[in-house]
């Protein structure tokens, strides 16, 4: 009975990990319809750049540990007056000295060295935040490209259907003897060209889907569709917000680290003391004695002048680099806000003014062609203009969302916590 119970327990132990492994595999792959939040979260888990950067932080932690270590003591064993000639041919006249030597750092060198290493680790933490924000921003913008490509493919599909419908209308008018056969040939050529554009749009979608999945470590995407409220745009432009970008916040730590390096170099001007002590055996007299001493280097010539000057110049360099980086950041932020304002105005203009007018014109042109009021070329030109405006609208929306993503990146907004577009519902229908 006991043996059967043990076998049963072993059986369940082997079975239990199987669901968890399957679940873990499922978590590593996005399938079906995905959302932006899902893409962001799986990127945080699997992005090769972020995974590699975690080792940099661990390496800096190890450097901090090493920087705080005390120097090891030195064991010094010396045998004198032995294995020579005459009276010194053996060990009878020898003197054996066994000493321990310990260097003691003065001037708070170890403390300053450890403090500098800790600041270096903090810089690595800032670098990780910068890398993380950059990767998530690329995911967001790549996701926008996928949504844009999906809409472009859908648009070309609608254009194919409309061209096929026009071909049917032309065929009926030819049968009725209202138009010449040449109009059907023109319509068929136009339809063939539109189908080529549809295939090009399909290839574009395939490429941007692969570019997105590469960010979370997949060279071949497994998802089918990217959902998101692509056509949702507020009536008012994006409001400005306070910037808390890690690229700027990092500089305070960088300056502190450079100052710490200056302090480390200055501390090197204070000489370290080496204490020694031990035991000496004098074989000739059979006596024992203690040996002790102190060693102090004299900093007469080398007072680390070059090291101190180098550290101070590096500190001054960082101060100037901070000014330059701050100015560039402010310029980039102003440019990003301008792009948001421009792209928002463009979207609203196309949506409220151009699209309604072009829709009415297309309906009137199609209706007029059926009654012979307009020619085939007029209808085809009207359809082409209609779809060009629709394509421009999709481009404008993508530009707007990309500009929002850029502003949020510059202001330090975590894309996962953002409440902007593509968070609720599908929103895949064009107005």
Image (tube, helix red, strand yellow):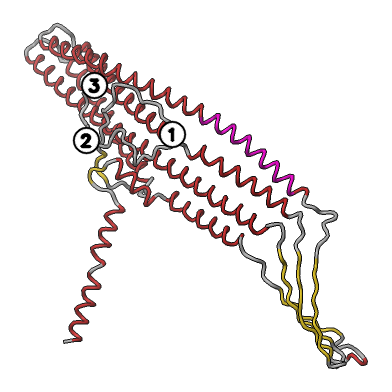
The reply to whether the C-beta atoms of the residues labelled 2 and 3 are less than 8 Å apart is no
For the point 28% across and 35% down, which residue is it?
A: 422
Magenta stretch bounds: 307-329
Name the secondary structure under disc 3.
Answer: helix
Crowding around mark 1 (Cα neighbors within 10 Å: few <14, some 14 to 19, many 20+) is: many
The reply to whether the C-beta atoms of the residues labelled 1 and 2 are less than 8 Å apart is no
For the point 23% across and 63% down, which residue is it?
A: 19
Give above or below for 257 relative to 383.
below
Give above or below for 234 relative to 294.
above
Q: Residue 317: within the magenta?
A: yes
Q: Quadrant of the C terminus?
A: top left
Which picture quadrant has residue 279? bottom right
Separation of residues labelled 1 and 2 (CA atoms): 27 Å
Which picture quadrant has residue 284? bottom right
Name the secondary structure under disc 1.
Answer: loop
**Is 210 on the left or on the right of 132, as rendered?**
left
Q: Which residue is mark 1?
A: 411
Q: Position of residue 96 (x, y in %)?
A: 80, 85
Q: Looking at the rendered structure, which numbered label has been put on residue 190? A: 3
Find the residue positioned furthest to the top: 373
Give above or below for 389 relative to 277.
above
Q: Position of residue 33 (x, y in %)?
A: 23, 43
Give above or below for 159 relative to 51.
above
Separation of residues labelled 1 and 3 (CA atoms): 47 Å
Q: Residue 130: within the magenta?
A: no
Q: Which residue is mark 2?
A: 426
**Is 352 on the left or on the right of 141, as rendered?**
left
């Amino acid at each position: 009975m006991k043996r059967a119970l043990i076998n049963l327990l072993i059986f369940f132990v082997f079975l239990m990990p199987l669901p968890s492994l399957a679940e873990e595999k499922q978590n590593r792959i996005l399938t079906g319809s995905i959302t932006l939040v899902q893409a962001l979260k799986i990127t945080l888990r699997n992005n090769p750049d972020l995974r590699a950067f975690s080792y940099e932080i661990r390496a800096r932690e190890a450097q901090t540990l090493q920087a705080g270590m005390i120097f090891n003591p030195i064991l010094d064993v010396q045998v004198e007056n032995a294995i020579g000639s005459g009276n010194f041919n053996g060990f009878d006249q020898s003197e054996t000295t066994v000493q321990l030597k310990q260097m003691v750092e003065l001037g708070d060198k170890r403390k300053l060295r450890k403090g500098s290493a800790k600041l270096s680790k903090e810089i690595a933490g800032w670098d990780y935040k910068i890398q993380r924000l950059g990767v998530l921003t690329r995911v967001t913008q790549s996701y926008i490209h996928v949504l844009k490509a999906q809409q472009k493919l859908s648009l070309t599909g609608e254009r194919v259907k409309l061209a096929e419908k026009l071909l049917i209308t032309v065929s009926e008018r030819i049968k009725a003897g209202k138009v010449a056969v040449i109009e059907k040939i023109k319509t068929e050529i136009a339809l063939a060209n539109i189908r080529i554009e549809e295939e090009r749009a399909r290839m574009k979608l395939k490429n941007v889907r692969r570019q997105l999945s590469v960010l979370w470590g997949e060279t071949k995407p497994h998802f089918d569709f990217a959902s998101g409220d692509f056509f949702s745009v507020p009536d008012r432009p994006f409001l400005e917000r306070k910037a808390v970008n890690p690229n700027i916040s990092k500089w305070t730590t960088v300056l502190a680290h450079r100052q710490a390096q200056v302090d480390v170099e200055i501390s090197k001007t204070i000489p370290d003391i080496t204490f020694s002590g031990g035991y000496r055996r004098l074989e000739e007299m059979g006596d024992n004695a203690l040996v002790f001493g102190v060693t102090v280097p004299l900093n007469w010539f080398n007072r680390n002048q070059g090291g101190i000057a180098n550290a101070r110049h590096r500190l001054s360099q960082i101060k100037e680099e901070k000014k330059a980086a701050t100015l560039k950041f402010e310029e980039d932020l102003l440019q990003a806000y301008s792009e948001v304002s421009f792209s928002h105005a463009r979207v609203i203009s196309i949506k409220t003014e151009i699209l309604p007018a072009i829709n009415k014109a297309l309906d009137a042109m199609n209706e007029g062609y059926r009654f012979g009021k307009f020619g085939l070329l007029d209808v085809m030109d009207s359809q082409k203009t209609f779809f060009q405006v629709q394509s421009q609208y999709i481009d404008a929306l993508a530009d707007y969302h990309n500009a929002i993503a850029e502003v949020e990146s510059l202001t330090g907004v975590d894309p996962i916590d953002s409440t902007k577009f593509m968070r609720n519902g599908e929103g895949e229908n064009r107005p």
